[in-house]
Image (spheres, rainbow, N blue to C red):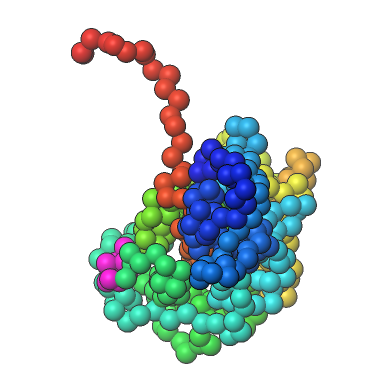
């Protein structure tokens, strides 16, 4: 996709060392990114004994530029963007090289987010919403019609939070991380409460629970919600994440970047699967069996929700982790049985349960509304969008500018 190193000139004869600025120009990145390549082991540097900076082997820089160009181009006809965040292979996925399921199973959502953002894992990390931003977001959300959906509320909340942040245009890593740590809890705090506020343990999962259901939380159910948030933080270049990268490439501030992601997430082909899976499970429980419900979906030409994923041949590892945790939740028994029955009926099609079906088991079991899965997904993925924005801010600006392939009538034509 990127063409920032399309014409890498050979190093001048006899001059095999490059300054940081020269290396940055050849690679089409900021000087700070050159040092990031050094820290990752992709480049070696040598301290300049005379000056204050470092110098780099020109052949190494040229080789990295060529390699980056090939990686950015990807397979013919397929969009590809370089990222160090999430790897998906062999029916597993990894955050910065660490098994994502293991990470989300052992650490709270906030800690998983910090790992994705910084590559460090601060124990007991918690996020807090600034009072001014939270008040502005709540006022804006309260002004919406009562029938507004969760994504409507989140989009309005993020815009309101942006307006009261005078530092939103500072795209330095420190400033963006500060915005991220305050924005995520602001989005949750701006959502209307389904039950009176209770004193919690400070985790974002606790704050989100009271926005999703009036049912009293128990530790096991809260742990399932926290696990779901951690599992959903990122998942490579989904459509909403690509929109985020494009916005960040244009140097949109982090609030605008999240707005771009939320806008795409509301598309029926991206964010609606959880709602559909919830309604299907509720209907299975109401009718006492999966067979007639599945038959009705197929007869109407509708896809059975919650099954299959283009990136996994077998079962979605996120679904497997959530189902395993849900088995320890007594109230989840009926919905879990309904989900397994749906999977059994569809087994002949070679489709396996995905994370939407597992999330629907949680939302049905805990008396959450059908759109609760969308809320969980959007809140969780906000951290991943910020992580992708942080990466994109280090790339050449406006690099995601494909050329249109015009196939209309050739000019000149007379005026209509």
Q: Residue at 66%, 71% (x, y): give it.
A: 104
Residue 169 found in image quarter:
bottom left
Q: Is residue 44 visible?
A: yes
* Majority SS type along the magenta span: helix
On screen, 385 above or below 25? below
Q: Can residue 226 be seen in this view?
A: no
The quadrant the N terminus occupies is top right
Find the residue positioned furthest to the bottom.
Answer: 199
Find the residue positioned furthest to the left.
Answer: 415
On screen, 216 above or below 377? below
User: Magenta stretch?
Assistant: 158-166
Residue 319 found in image quarter:
bottom right
Q: Residue at 49%, 60% (x, y): give it.
A: 31
Q: In this view, does 26 lie to the left or right of 43?
A: left
Q: Is residue 106 left or right of residue 31?
A: right
The tally of labels here is 0
The quadrant the C terminus occupies is top left
Residue 232 found in image quarter:
bottom right
Q: Residue at 32%, 82% (x, y): give it.
A: 131
Q: Is residue 244 left or right of residue 331?
A: left
Q: Position of residue 366 (x, y in %)?
A: 57, 71
Is 186 one of the magenta-colored residues?
no
Q: Where is residue 187 in the image (x, y as percent from the top left)?
A: 40, 70
On screen, 242 above or below 19? above
Q: Position of residue 51 (x, y in %)?
A: 51, 69
> Which sits in the foreground, 227 or 132?
132
> Which sits in the foreground, 37 or 173?
37
> Which sits in the foreground, 306 or 185?
185
Q: Position of residue 40 (x, y in %)?
A: 65, 63
> Which sits in the foreground, 348 or 341?
348
Q: Residue at 62%, 48% (x, y): give it.
A: 14
Is 162 one of the magenta-colored residues?
yes
């Amino acid at each position: 996709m990127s063409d920032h190193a399309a014409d890498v000139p050979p190093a001048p004869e006899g001059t095999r060392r490059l300054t940081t600025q020269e290396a940055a120009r050849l690679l089409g990145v900021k000087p700070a990114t050159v040092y990031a390549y050094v820290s990752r082991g992709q480049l070696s540097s040598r301290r300049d004994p005379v000056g204050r900076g470092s110098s780099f082997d020109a052949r190494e820089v040229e080789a990295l530029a060529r390699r980056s160009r090939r990686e950015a181009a990807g397979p013919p006809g397929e969009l590809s963007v370089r990222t160090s965040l999430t790897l998906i292979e062999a029916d597993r996925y990894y955050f910065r090289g660490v098994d994502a399921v293991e990470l989300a199973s052992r650490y709270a959502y906030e800690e998983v987010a910090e790992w994705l953002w910084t590559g460090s894992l601060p124990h007991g990390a918690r996020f807090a919403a600034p009072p001014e931003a939270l008040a502005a977001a709540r006022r804006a959300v309260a002004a919406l019609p009562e029938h507004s959906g969760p994504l409507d509320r989140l989009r309005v909340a993020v815009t309101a939070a942006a307006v009261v942040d005078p530092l939103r245009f500072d795209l330095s890593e420190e400033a963006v991380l500060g915005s991220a740590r305050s924005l995520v809890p602001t989005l949750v705090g701006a959502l209307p409460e389904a039950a009176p506020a209770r004193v919690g343990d400070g985790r974002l999962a606790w704050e989100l629970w009271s926005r999703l259901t009036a049912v009293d939380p128990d530790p096991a159910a809260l742990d399932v919600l926290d696990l779901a948030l951690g599992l959903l933080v990122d998942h490579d270049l989904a459509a909403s994440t690509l929109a985020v990268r494009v916005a960040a490439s244009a140097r949109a501030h982090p609030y605008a970047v999240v707005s771009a992601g939320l806008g795409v997430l509301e598309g029926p082909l991206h964010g609606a699967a959880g709602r559909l899976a919830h309604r299907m499970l509720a209907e299975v429980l109401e009718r006492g069996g999966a067979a007639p419900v599945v038959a009705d979906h197929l007869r109407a030409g509708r896809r059975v929700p919650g099954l299959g994923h283009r990136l996994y041949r077998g079962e979605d590892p996120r679904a497997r982790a959530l189902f395993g945790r849900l088995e320890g939740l007594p109230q989840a028994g009926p919905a879990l049985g309904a989900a397994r029955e749906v999977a059994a009926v569809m087994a002949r099609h070679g489709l396996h349960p995905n994370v939407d079906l597992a999330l629907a088991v949680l939302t049905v079991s805990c008396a959450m509304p059908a759109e609760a899965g969308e809320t969980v997904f959007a809140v969780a993925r906000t951290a991943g969008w910020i992580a992708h924005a942080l990466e994109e801010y280090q790339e050449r600006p406006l690099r995601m500018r494909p050329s249109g392939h015009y196939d209309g009538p050739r000019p000149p034509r007379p005026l209509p």
